[in-house]
């Protein structure tokens, strides 16, 4: 499998400009904090950001509407897609930085060794009912807020929540066990009025240091929350399928991905409430490798599902692991203007991996998790 962070030194854009004028650690969008309170550090990082001063292109999800979409994509179905993705987007607060990062130079150990905790983004892809007694869950602790403020927890009733993020956000099991996941953190008031919910990391379902993708397993005893999350995940899947049927397209293993296609990111930059940024997919030629790139032409590029996506969508520290997706436009044309085609969104949804502000191109993780995880069963 391709180790994209190292190979980027050989990558060229379509004009032949070498994309290697940066250090890998400069590209990671993982926000590292010191020992101050999270809210204060987050606000300071937002105000002092040098990547995107003023954050004028970052739109709060509570304000996002049709007018923000480019004309070619200005439809209710695309807006619904953004809102639905936002419903499953989460903020991850990882309160441990594993010393094992030093074994993998690309996983920003040099940035994390002096930090107390770090923040990233992710998105929920599955909810399942647990079986047997829950052991070691933070909610089960006698001193937890759940135990102190609410009724006694039944350790035999619990639910697992699968969350996709980047490996450099949640590096291993040690970090998974120290991860707090903030759900529905959509505006400043959501924390105060308790719309924001918290679940805790328990283990790693899947992690890969080569494609920088990770599936974090969390646990909750809140049946109401689990049911709501499951419905959100189901709605996300249904919207993508609905769009595919709407355009009546049968998606083969290979599809041409047009450059300049709208690329949307939903994330928690600097640990702030959910924000939306819009950009375009960009063409970058990676040295061909078996099972990776089959054909490249001036107008289209045939891409296997394991390829990353490159884009100029704005990101900031805290955006790592966020969902990045390319919705359907009203119509997209191939070289032949009489032939209309589109690509199923499920094939082009990824997690954000690198945000290279120096050349203006970001990169997703390589493997789309919707192709890995089976459709989850409804919570009973």
Image: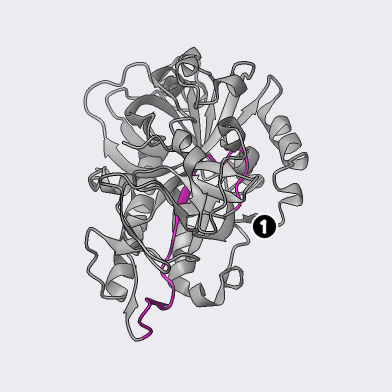
**Quadrant location, the N terminus:** top left
- Estimate the x, y position of residue 240 in percent, counting from the top left: 34, 62
- For residue 321, say whether it is visible: no
| Magenta highlight on residue 254 | no
Image side of residue 169 versus residue 136, left or right: right
Q: In the rendered view, would you say 159 is above or below 36? A: below
Q: Who's the residue at 50% across and 20% down the image?
A: 144
Location of residue 181 in the rendering, given as x and y in whole percent from the top left corner: 49, 33
Predominant SS of the magenta segment = loop
The percent coordinates of residue 122 (x first, y second) are: 46, 41
Question: Residue extending furthest bottom?
Answer: 338
Please identify the residue farthest to the front as the structure is shown: 16
> Is residue 150 shown above or below 331?
above
Q: What stretch is highlighted in magenta?
A: 314-337
The quarter of the picture where residue 294 lies is bottom left
At numbered mark 1, what does the secondary structure look like: helix, strand or loop?
loop
Residue 348 or 4: which is nearer the viewer?
4
Instruction: Classify residue 111 by image quadrant.
Output: top right
The residue closer to the viewer here, 95 or 172, is: 172
Where the C terminus falls, by quadrant?
Answer: top left
Q: Name the residue under label 1.
A: 57
Q: Which of 228 and 16 is in front in this view?
A: 16
The relative height of residue 261 versus residue 132 in the rendered view (above or below) is: below
| Residue drawn at (27%, 38%) of the image | 128
Q: Is residue 136 above or below residue 191?
A: above
Q: Residue at x 39, y 29 (%)?
A: 209
Crowd around label 1: few <14 · some 14–19 · many ≥20 (10 Å): some
């Amino acid at each position: 499998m391709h180790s994209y962070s190292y190979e980027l030194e050989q990558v060229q854009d379509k004009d032949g400009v070498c994309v290697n004028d940066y250090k890998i650690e400069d590209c990671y969008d993982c926000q590292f904090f010191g020992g101050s309170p999270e809210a204060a550090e987050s606000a300071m990082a937002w105000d002092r950001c040098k990547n995107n001063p003023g954050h004028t292109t970052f739109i709060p999800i509570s304000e996002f509407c049709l007018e923000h979409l480019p004309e070619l994509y200005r439809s209710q179905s695309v807006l619904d897609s953004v809102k639905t993705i936002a419903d499953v987007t989460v903020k991850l607060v990882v309160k441990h930085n594993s010393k094992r990062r030093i074994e993998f130079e690309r996983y920003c150990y040099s940035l994390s060794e002096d930090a107390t905790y770090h923040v990233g983004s992710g998105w929920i892809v599955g909810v399942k009912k647990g079986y047997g007694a829950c052991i070691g869950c933070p909610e089960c602790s006698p001193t937890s807020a759940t135990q102190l403020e609410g009724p006694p927890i039944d350790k035999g009733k619990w639910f697992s929540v699968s969350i996709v993020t980047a490996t450099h956000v949640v590096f291993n099991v040690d970090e998974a066990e120290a991860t707090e996941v903030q759900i529905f953190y959509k505006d400043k008031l959501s924390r105060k009025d308790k719309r924001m919910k918290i679940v805790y990391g328990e283990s790693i379902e899947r992690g890969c240091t080569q494609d920088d993708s990770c599936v974090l397993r969390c646990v909750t005893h809140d049946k109401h929350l689990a049911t709501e999350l499951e419905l959100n995940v189901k709605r996300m899947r249904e919207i993508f399928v609905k769009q595919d049927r709407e355009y009546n397209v049968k998606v083969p293993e290979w599809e041409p991905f047009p450059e300049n296609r709208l690329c949307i990111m939903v994330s928690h930059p600097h640990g702030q409430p959910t924000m939306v940024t819009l950009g375009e997919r960009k063409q970058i030629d990676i040295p061909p490798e078996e099972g990776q790139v089959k054909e490249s032409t001036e107008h289209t590029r045939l891409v296997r599902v394991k390829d990353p996506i490159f884009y100029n969508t704005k990101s900031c520290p805290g955006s790592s692991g966020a969902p990045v997706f390319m919705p359907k436009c009203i119509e997209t044309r191939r070289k032949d203007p009489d032939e209309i085609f589109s690509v199923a969104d499920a094939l082009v949804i990824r997690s954000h991996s690198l945000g290279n502000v120096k050349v203006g191109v970001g990169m997703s993780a390589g493997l789309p998790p919707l192709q890995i995880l089976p459709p989850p069963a409804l919570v009973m």
